Amino acid sequence: MAHHADWLPSSRDRQLSMAKDWISVATPKADPWDIPPAVLQDLGSLTQAADTALSTAKNETTRTPVATAKCREAFDGLTAKMRDMKKRYFLSPPLTEADFISLGLKPPDPAHTPSAAPTAQVRVETFLMGRHELGLKIVYVTGSPSDPANKGFRIYYAVAGSGETPPARPEDLHESFFTKRKKDLIQFDFGDSGKTAYFAVQIENDGKKGNWGPLISALIP
């Protein structure tokens, strides 16, 4: 199963920096934001564990498959905690716009403006990022990125190993995530290394979807 960062930064260094910022910003506001002390303690422990694991995995003398796996596990735990905190404590008042910005989050938009269905077509290109990671780049085939109907992208994917039937068309891809970035990152499980990932993308705008881009494939490092 692949993992996508969503609103999180795409690199582990930046995820770690965000977690540290959260601790700094949220600790003095724990009471008015109704954040239990144990939640911040857990975030601090997970942040420290991720920091140590990342340093070990990046060091040439200590970087091993085991260290890489432990680093992935540490960041899985950290980002899961951050997702839970954002959902439970950071999505509603008493947080102000300045509070959202201090946490590295986009303030919610109270106004909803109906928009048109997208007509442009895009394709996805891949590039290497790290072990079990692929960078994804959105390239326009038709249409313009400045068109307000082209707000974001629904990237569909699947993973197939040796002896498994690969998808034959974009409609065969059932896993997906939404992004507004022209460049993004997808992370795969340790056991997916050497398998083939398949991708296709549609522009998506408030549930309205554009034309399919071509089905492409890439080897998972």
Image (tube, rainbow, N blue to C red):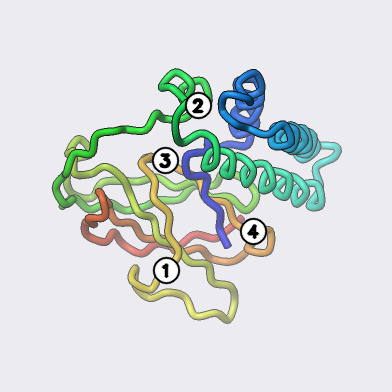
Residue marked by disc 3: 183
User: Which of the two marks, 1 or 2, is nearer to us in this view?
Assistant: 2
Q: Position of residue 144 (x, y in %)?
A: 18, 40
Disc 1 marks which amino acid? His
Residues marked 4 and 2 touching at CB (< 8 Å): no
User: Which of the two marks, 4 or 2, is nearer to us in this view?
Assistant: 2
Residue marked by disc 4: 189
Question: Quick one: SS at disc 1?
Answer: loop
Residue marked by disc 2: 104
Residues marked 1 and 2 touching at CB (< 8 Å): no
Residues marked 3 and 2 touching at CB (< 8 Å): no
Q: Is residue 53 left or right of residue 138?
A: right
Disc 2 marks which amino acid? Gly
Q: CA distance from mark 4 to mark 2?
A: 27 Å
Q: How many numbered marks, from 0 up?
A: 4
User: Which of the two marks, 4 or 1, is nearer to us in this view?
Assistant: 1
Q: Position of residue 121 (x, y in %)?
A: 22, 53
Q: Which tag, 4 or 3, sits closer to the chain's start? A: 3
Residue plotted at (63% across, 32% down): 35
Residue marked by disc 1: 174
Disc 4 marks which amino acid? Asp
Q: Which tag, 4 or 1, sits closer to the chain's start? A: 1
- Residue 164's disc number: none
Q: Is residue 33 left or right of residue 143?
A: right
Q: Which tag, 3 or 2, sits closer to the chain's start? A: 2
Question: Quick one: SS at disc 2?
Answer: loop
Mark 4, Cα crowd under 10 Å, few <14 / some 14-19 / many 20+, is some
Q: Which tag, 1 or 3, sits closer to the chain's start? A: 1
Quarter of image, res 210: bottom left
Q: Which tag, 4 or 2, sits closer to the chain's start? A: 2
Residue plotted at (56% across, 58% down): 2
Q: Which tag, 1 or 2, sits closer to the chain's start? A: 2
